[in-house]
Image: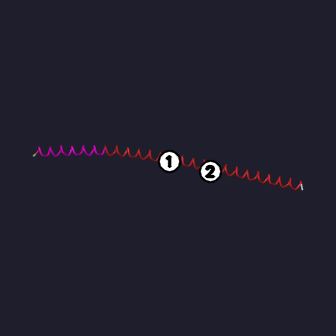
Amino acid sequence: MSTAVVVIIIVAAVVLVALLALAAMRRRRQAQLGQAQSQALHEDVDRHRSHAEAARHDAALAEERAKRTAAEAELEERRADERERELDEGR
């Protein structure tokens, strides 16, 4: 009977060690998954910030072009007024 008890204890210990090893592997896998998800979120944030910076840059360029175009239109308007005055004076 004592041999059977020793065998049962050994089998129970082996099963317990196997269960603990499985639990440790599961925790490690979950930790790795959490790190991968965290890294992916950081990369997503960086991508959004990069896109925002590019959009701001594009907006600044568009604003500068709009100012330049408005100045050119104003200059053309002045030239048209001058030519019109010259025509009126020539009559």
Under tag 2, what secondary structure? helix
Near mark 1 (Cα within 10 A), the count class, few <14, some 14-19 or many ≥20, is: few
- Amino acid found under the numbered disc labelled 2: Leu
Assess whether residue 82 is covered by the magenta stretch.
yes
Which label belongs to residue 47? 1
Magenta-colored span:
68-89
Query: Residue 61: percent from the left, percent from the top?
Result: 37, 44
State the separation of the CA atoms marked 2 and 1: 21 Å
Describe residue 63's horizontal placement relative to residue 39 as left or right. left
Instruction: Quadrant for residue 7, please give it.
Output: bottom right
Point out the tag, 2 or 1, that comes first from the N-terminus.
2
Instruction: Quadrant for residue 56, please give it.
Output: top left
Instruction: Quadrant for residue 82, please give it.
Output: top left
- Amino acid found under the numbered disc labelled 1: Arg
Under tag 1, what secondary structure? helix
Q: Residue at x 66, y 51 (%)?
A: 29
Near mark 2 (Cα within 10 A), the count class, few <14, some 14-19 or many ≥20, is: few
Residue labelled with disc 2:
33
Query: Residue 38: percent from the left, percent from the top?
Result: 57, 48
Describe residue 51's horizontal placement relative to residue 78 as left or right. right
Q: Nearer the viewer, residue 58 or 19?
A: 19
Query: Residue 67: percent from the left, percent from the top?
Result: 31, 44
Q: Residue at x 14, y 46 (%)?
A: 87
Describe residue 26's horizontal placement relative to residue 6 as left or right. left
Q: Residue at x 70, y 50 (%)?
A: 25
Describe residue 34's horizontal placement relative to residue 81 as left or right. right
Q: Nearer the viewer, residue 47 or 1?
A: 1
Q: Residue at x 83, y 55 (%)?
A: 8
Q: Nearer the viewer, residue 24 or 73?
A: 24
Classified by dominant secondary structure, the portion drawn in magenta counts as helix
Marks 2 and 1 close (CB-CB < 8 Å): no
